[in-house]
Amino acid sequence: MSRLPENFLWGGAVAANQLEGAWNVDGKGISTADCMSAGAVDKERIYTDGIQEGVYYPNHEGIDFYHHYQEDIAMFAEMGFKCFRTSIAWTRIFPQGDEKEPNELGLQFYDRVFDECLKYGIEPVVTISHYETPYGLVKKYGSWRSRSMIDFYTRFCEVIFNRYKDKVKYWMTFNEINCISLHPAIPTGIRIGTDENFHQVTLQAAHHMFVASAKAVKLGHAINPDFKIGMMMLYPQTYAETCNPLDALKQMQAMDMQYYYSDVQVRGYYSSKAKKMQQALGVKLAAEPEDDAILREGKVDYIGFSYYMSMVASADLNKQVSGGNMLKGIKNPYLKASEWGWQIDPVGLRLTLNNLYDRYQLPLFIVENGLGAIDQIEADGSICDDYRIEYLREHIKEMIKAVDEDGVELMGYTPWGCIDLISAGTGEMKKRYGFIYVDRDDEGHGTLARSKKKSFEWYKQVIASNGEKL
Ligand code: BG6
C-alpha cells in the first residue's frame, strides 16, 4: 500500500531559458537570461547590457530542447512521469514584451511541447515567468520598477491562458518570487545603483509582481475554472545556531523576509509585520487604491516551492559563510555540503513541508529539489550517479513522512533539471542534476546526445511504486 495519494504528480522540472536554446529562432526576442555570461562557483555571471560580442552566453544554445523536445519527452515518459514542469519563454510570445499581438510561431512551439506531453499522459505544469524578462521591457520601462509591467504581464497571461486552456491545468505565476530580495537581476533584470535604497526598489517591484500575479489568478480562473494557479518560492529552511534567544530572533527575522512574499500571495494582504518591515527598511510603497482588492481577489490555489539545502542564522556576524546561489549562511556542522557548498539536509525538507502547511493549510507542491554534481562517464558510456540517487532517496523518505505521519497535503514532486541543463546560478553545464545526461560542456562543445544515467532506472521504479521502492 502506497503512503502517497494515488494521483501524486511525480515528474521533473526545468525552465525554458536553461534548456530550450534557440534564443533567436522563430521570432524570439532577447530575454534577461540571454544576457547572462558564463560563471563558476567562484565567478559571478555577468549580466551584460544586451548581447555583447566576444561574450559566451551558455543559455543561447542551452541543450537545444527546442529541437530535441520529442526525444526528451519520450524519455520522461519512459521514466513514467505524470507531470512535466517547464516555463514559457515570454520573449517567444512577446519578443519585446510590449507588442499588442503575440508571435504565432512562439505559441506553436508550446502547442507542440504540450501536445507531446499529453500524448503520453504527462500533465504540463507551467511557470509563467521563470527567471527571464524581455530585455526590451528592462530597457524601455526598467522592468518591474514600473507599474506598466502589470499590463504587459497580464496580457501575456491572457494570451497563454486562452491558447493552452485545454492543455494546461497547473500554473505558477513567478518562479522563486522571494529571490528578488536576494538577487534582483535574476528574476527581474533590474539593476540597482549603489545610491539607491535596495529595499525600496525590490519591494516596490515585488508589489507590482504581487498585483500582476493576483490579476493573473483571477483572469485564469475566469478563463478556465479548473485551473490551479500557484505561487512559487525558494524555501530556505533556517535554523538558529544555538539556543541563545538572540540566535532564535535572527532565525525568525531571516524567515520573515521570505514569508513576506508568500504571505501576500497566499493571504491576499500585507500583514502588520510586513508593514513594519517596510517602515524599518525605509520603504514607501507606491500603490493604487484598487490594489488591496486585487490582492484579496487573486489569492493562489497552492504553494510550489524549491528546496535544496538549509541555512543557519546567528546573532554573531563574524561566522564562516557557506554558499548557495543567492543565499549566504553559516556552516552547519551536522550536514555535508555539495561541491557548490549547498548544505544537504533531507530532514529540512520535512520541516519545510510542515512549516508551510501549518502556516497556510494550502496544498503544497515540491517543484524543485536535487543535487548539482559533476558526473563521470565510464569507458562503457555508463554514468553511475549513486550520490544523486542517495540525495533524492533521502529527501523522498522525508517527504513521505511529512505526508504519511504529519498529514501534509502534497500534490507532487518534480526534481530539478530532470535532464541536464544550464545552471541558473553559475551558467555551468558541469553542474548537473539530470537523470538524463546531455553531451555538452562549459564551453558549449559536445554532440548534445542524450543518455541515461543510473538514476534513470532508479527514478522509474520510484514512480512505478508510488514512492515505495526507494
Ligand atoms: C532554483 C531555480 O533556484 O535553483 C532554477 O529556480 C535553478 O532555475 C535551480 O537552476 C538550481 O540552481 P543552479 O544554480 O544549480 O542552477
Image (spheres, helix red, strand yellow):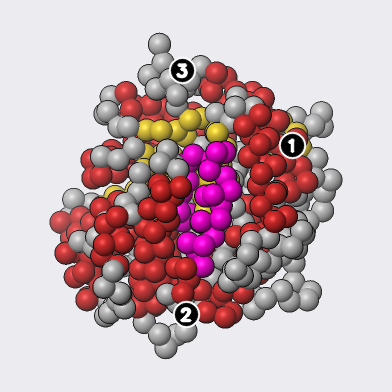
Q: Residues within 10 Å of mark 1 (few under 14, many from 20)?
A: some
The residue lying at 70 percent from left, 48 percent from top is 109
Task: Give the quarter of the figure containing the N terminus.
Answer: top left
Q: As drawn, is 448 to the left or to the right of 265?
A: right
The image quadrant of residue 130 is bottom right
Residue depth check, mark 3 versus mark 1: number of the one nearer the observer: 1
Residue 380 in view of the camera: yes
Q: Which residue carries the number 1 mark?
A: 70
Image coords of residue 331 (percent x, y) = 39, 53
- Depth order, front residue of 189/228: 228
Q: Which residue carries the number 2 mark?
A: 192
- Asked if 411 appears above or below 7 in the picture, the reply is below
Label 1 is placed on what type of residue? Answer: Gln
The residue lying at 74 percent from left, 37 percent from top is 70
Distance from Cα at disc 2 to Cα at disc 1: 41 Å
State which region is magenta: 152-175
Badge 3 marks a residue whose secondary structure is loop
The image quadrant of residue 459 is top right
Of all residues, the one furthest to the top in this rendering is: 1
Image coords of residue 416 (percent x, y) = 55, 42
Label 2 is placed on what type of residue? Answer: Ile
Residue depth check, mark 2 versus mark 1: number of the one nearer the observer: 1
- Depth order, front residue of 447/379: 447
Specify which label sits upstream in the sequence, 3 or 1: 1
